[in-house]
Image (cartoon, helix red, strand yellow):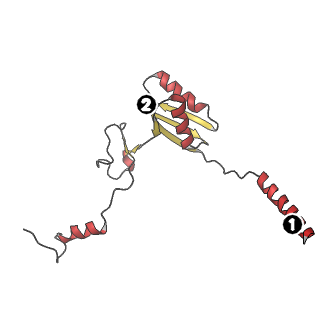
Amino acid sequence: MGVLGGTLDVISDMIFTVRSRRKFRKHKQLRTVEIKVRMDCEGCERRVQDAVRGMKDVTDVLVEPKKNKLTVTGYVEPRKVLRRVSWKTGKKAEMWPFVPYTLVDHPYVPGVYDKKAPPGYVRNAGDLARAGSAEERLVSAFSDDNPNACVVM
């Protein structure tokens, strides 16, 4: 049993060392990251642009000062870009919260419409809240379509 146990140890060590040497890397995807950063002057624009340009795997940087928007294209993670911008510039940075108003079903609903949004954009709100089963029962109780509904005149 001692010889057999020793050979099993040697074989298992060989298998695990080969497996640990390989690095399992996920292939990074090309992403476009949009960040909202307040830029007051040309110096701010340059600082924001330089902060991101120095990152590894960044292919393109576009700064739109009128919209306070930074667009980064490359094989990067959005969280890392966001941290880098806020750390290097000392400015508050957040993910771009707006989408073109043509992509939203009801762009003027109070939760979606935002006066601070750039022209042609509204807040990125998910699906609008739908009524639950209890709310539907209450609405249908006083409905004209329901013949068994309560009639209040």
Residue 101 lies left or right of residue 150; in this view the side is right
Res 120 quadrant in image: top left
Res 17 quadrant in image: bottom right
Q: Amino acid at mark 2?
A: Arg
Residue 74 lies left or right of residue 20; in this view the side is left
- Looking at the image, residue 45 lies above or below residue 117: above
Residue at the outermost right position: 3
Residue 73 lies left or right of residue 94; in this view the side is right
Q: Which residue is mark 2?
A: 38
Residue at the outermost front position: 2
Residue at x 55% of width, y 35% of height: 84
Q: Amino acid at mark 1?
A: Leu
Q: Which mark is residue 8?
A: 1
| Residue depth check, mark 1 versus mark 2: number of the one nearer the observer | 1
- Image coordinates of residue 145 in percent, x first then y, are 19, 72
Give the number of callouts: 2
Q: Tag 2's secondary structure?
A: loop
- Image coordinates of residue 13 in percent, x first then y, are 83, 59
- Image coordinates of residue 44 in percent, x first then y, are 48, 25
Residue at x 50% of width, y 29% of height: 90
- Looking at the image, residue 75 lies above or below residue 137: above
Task: Judge by depth and name the residue closer to the eye, 66 or 153.
Answer: 153
Q: Which of the image's four quarters has the N terminus?
A: bottom right
Q: Which of the image's four quarters has the C terminus?
A: bottom left
